Amino acid sequence: MEDQREALRKIITTLAVKNEETQTFIYSLKQMLLNVEANSVRVQEDLEAEFQSLTAVLEELKESMLMKIKQDRASRTYELQNQLAACTRALESSEELLETANQTLQAADSDDFPQAAKQIKDGVTMAPAFRLSLKAKVSDNMSHLMVDFTQERQMLQTLKFLPVPSAPIIDLTESLVADNCVTLVWRMPDEDSKIDHYVLEYRKTNFEGPPRLKEDHPWMVIEGIRQTEHTLTGLKFDMKYMNFRVKACNKAVAGEFSEPVTLETPAFMFRLDGSTSHQNLRVEDLSVEWDAMGGKVQDIKAREKEAKGRTASPVNSPARGTPSPKRMSSGRGGRDRFTAESYTVLGDTLIDGGEHYWEVRFEPDSKAFGLGVAYRSLGRFEQLGKTAASWCLHANNWLQASFTAKHANKVKVLDSPVPDCLGVHCDFHQGLLSFYNARTKQLLHTFKAKFTQPLLPAFTVWCGSFQVTTGLQVPSAVRCLQKRGSATSSSNTSLT
């Protein structure tokens, strides 16, 4: 009977989920119906506006060309009228001179004939008719102002709605996740010269594969991308996966989104476990400050709690959310707390495989500090690097300055200034623990080891403070150095 009830409960849950999905889809369909009506009105108005704009352009062009014809007609009319007037005056003068010559010829027997003939000859020489060009200054042909709209008419006849761009295809083989950046590359299935820009959307997710119907994280939008690739920079990966999708847009319309893709963005996330810290360390999630009075304050509070019949517990322990399977419990007893001169605190997440990277920035006035990894079995009186259960870089700015690599009480002096920010790269399976200048990615030292137990990030500080940055990708420069074998170079000889 109980099995049948449990089966029925599962069926009810499944039906409830399906009903909710169906209701959501019905709401989506109703919204789409409203959008169809609204969008139809909008595109109709846009079309009418475009044709009105085209008509206005044609009217403006028509007025300009008519003005050109009027100006050319006025210019030619002026030239021809002037030439006509000059020719008319020359003809009248020539006719008067001709009549005078005929009369003089009829009176050839008179004594005044020689003088009159000479005057007529001189008049003919100076006559305007003989200085005129009998060729029109301008042509009456106006064909140079004719237009042929054949090509334009054909273009207008082929005018049609702007095609909706196809959905781009994201090329996962060309896309890259590195250096806290994601470079996404895509291509169009067909060449489209009308595309103006692209829109990229992304969001974080906890799930591999296609996006879920319900996601806690909204899509982030990047618009106006002109190229077929884009790089997101400055990311801090606090989730394992990220969804991406992209769409193409022309001047009028946006196409459909590409098929969403999910890229894995693995990064090592941990916090500092206040229950493991020395009493003189004030610990927050990712920062530590040395406090000379911390131990006395802890002792007072412990005695107060013991007097009330309660178990002493460390102060300033960070609040914890749902722990990961590798995250250590914060309820570790006082026996694990570091004491004496071991001013140490451990991370709360185990490293039992893969590659991980984090960075640590120490305050410049810190007298002494160290960073590295340790087994959980590191004793409460043991200092980092002085036993076989820990590996670290150690800087001492007190009295005699030193910068060394330490493991199993062996020390190697490093010939390098102490950076203000150090990077730690742990490759568990390869047995490599490398330290870098986080600013320049210069390799400082590499330990070669065979890790036999899971590791915890480990830190020490005396008279100072530090800040840890987690959720970082392994920088590509670090990967390249590892691949080229720089870890084994003579200037960075391993301390095993």
Image (cartoon, helix red, strand yellow):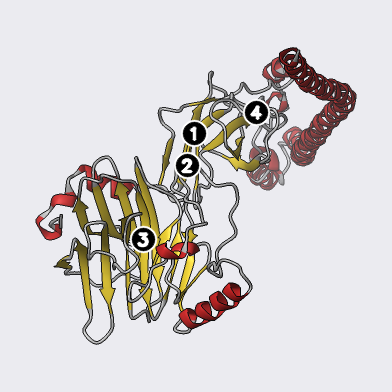
- First in sequence: mark 3 or mark 2? 2
Mark 1 or mark 3, whichever is nearer to me: 3
Label 1: element kind = strand
Circle 2: is it few (<14), some (14-19), or many (20+) Cα within 10 Å? some
Which mark identifies residue 212?
A: 4
Look at mark 2 in the image and give the residue it sits on.
Answer: 182
Mark 2 touching mark 4, by CB under 8 A?
Answer: no
Q: Residues within 10 Å of mark 4 (few under 14, many from 20)?
A: few
Instruction: Name which residue type carries label 1.
Output: Leu
How far from the left and from the top, in percent, is residue 4?
A: 75, 12
Which residue is under mark 1? 263
Q: CA distance from mark 2 to mark 4?
A: 21 Å
For the C terminus, give its image quadrant: bottom left
Label 3: state its secondary structure.
Answer: strand
The kind of residue tagged 4 is Arg
Image depth: mark 3 or mark 4 in front: 3
Nearer-N-terminus badge (4/1)? 4
Foreground: disc 3 or disc 2: 3
Residue 142: quadrant of the picture: top right
Quadrant in the rendering for residue 418: bottom left
Q: Between residue 69 and residue 374, name the one nearer to us.
A: 374
| Mark nearer the viewer, 1 or 2 | 1
Label 1 vs 3, first from the N-terminus: 1
The residue singled out by tag 3 in the image is: 458
Q: Mark 2 or 4, which is nearer the eye?
A: 4
Q: Is residue 269 above or below residue 302?
A: above
Name the element at disc 2: strand
